[in-house]
Amino acid sequence: MEKIILTGDRPTGKLHLGHYVGSLKRRVELQNSGEFDKIFVMIADAQALTDNADNPEKVRQNIIEVALDYLSVGIDPSKTTIFIQSQVPELTELAFYYMNLVTVSRVQRNPTVKTEIKMRNFEQSIPVGFFCYPVSQASDITAFRATTVPVGEDQAPMIELTREIVNRFNNVYGDTLVEPEILLPENEACQRLPGTDGKAKMSKSLGNCIYLSDSAKEVSKKVKSMYTDPLHLNVCDPGHLEGNCPFIYLDAFCKEEHFERYLPEYKNLQELKDHYTRGGLGDGTVKKFLAAVIEEELAPIRERRKEWEQNIPAVYDILKRGSEEARRVAASTLDDVRRAMRINYFDDMDLVSEQSKKYSGK
Ligand code: ATP
Ligand code: MG
């Protein structure tokens, strides 16, 4: 069986460090590993509209931002198909059929959807489209016969639901769809990077992000204002690591060689943590170190972005060609699905003769 990746992002803002460690970095590694037959990366504009229906301009403006972020982190359009979800209408048709295979209570139990409904104050007035987006995600994944979905931990319930839909579909209509597997970052801190405000998740919708395109000055300012340990008032006080953003970010980003370069007084992260918990190490030192570590990662990304920004027509061209390719693949899966569901009336030569026989009594 071919090894195929499908993953994507909502064009609701520029991409941030959470996306980078949760998914983007892995995608680039997998893309360059040569282990995969095909890789599809989707800009999920239709999904973004499920909670931004009254603000299509926001979605439209952010498509290019997300595409620029992709290209600047190293997603290579000669190896990866980058496409826009709404330009592949086959996905919507698939979702419509899958909706019959899922119950309302099953979607209601989805913990990510629950959190997102609360976050958006949708409790009383949830749009049907938003409620159904996990089902639409199942069609995105299965349309490309994806075997592997590299995402952050918040997506785990979506992949689980997709697997259930695949199994239900194959049981009812015969073996047609491929069951995907989630690929989470190995490093736990990367599975759900918290926001700079200490909230559980860095998220475009919460405004607690360090963006990949932030300037060095912005990064340093955001790191300086990061949530740390509220009980660590004086340098000499013992500090706590739990929920302490700079340390969680260091868990996600820091390598031993960073100490040689930016903080040679310590050999590794454990030594730094030990000093902090013992007392005697100020948040300022930790934050300065973290800013240098992040800057090392972001500087080349920022440079590549500047180059692509000079060639916007080429970026749209990549998206257009990618969307055409994605459409071809999704259409072929949709053909299989229609055949399996026996709704391929006009391609089914047996149907006419079957019905004719019924009425002619022969
Ligand atoms: P929105 O607030 O509009 O939902 P978002 O910041 O949650 O935006 P998405 O586009 O929903 O971003 O997520 C895209 C991908 O990035 C998913 O694979 C998701 O798991 C991953 N991701 C998003 N935020 C984080 C995070 N803080 N840590 C790790 N992975 C993340
Ligand atoms: Mg999200």
Image (tube, grey):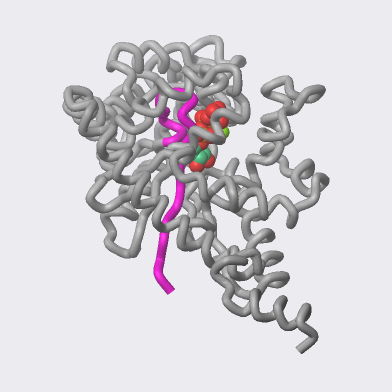
Give the residue displayed 51% in from the left and 21% down from the top.
56
Residue drawn at the location 65% of the way across and 80% of the way down: 353
Residue 186, relative to residue 209: is it above or below? below
Which span is picked out in magenta? Answer: 1-19
Residue 8 lies in magenta, yes or no?
yes
Residue 118 image point, x, y percent: 73, 25
Q: Position of residue 211 (x, y in %)?
A: 39, 23
Residue 153 seen by the camera: yes
List x then y, in percent, for residue 175: 61, 74
In the image, what residue occupies the spot 39% across and 36% down? 20
Would residue 241 be visible to someone looking at this image?
Answer: no
Q: Is residue 250 above or below residue 141?
A: above
Tell me where residue 290 sits by quadrant.
top left
In magenta segment, residue 317: no
Residue found at x 35% / y 17%: 219
| Quadrant position of residue 294 | top left
In this view, the residue in front, 174 or 232, is 174
Image quadrant in which the C terminus is located: bottom right
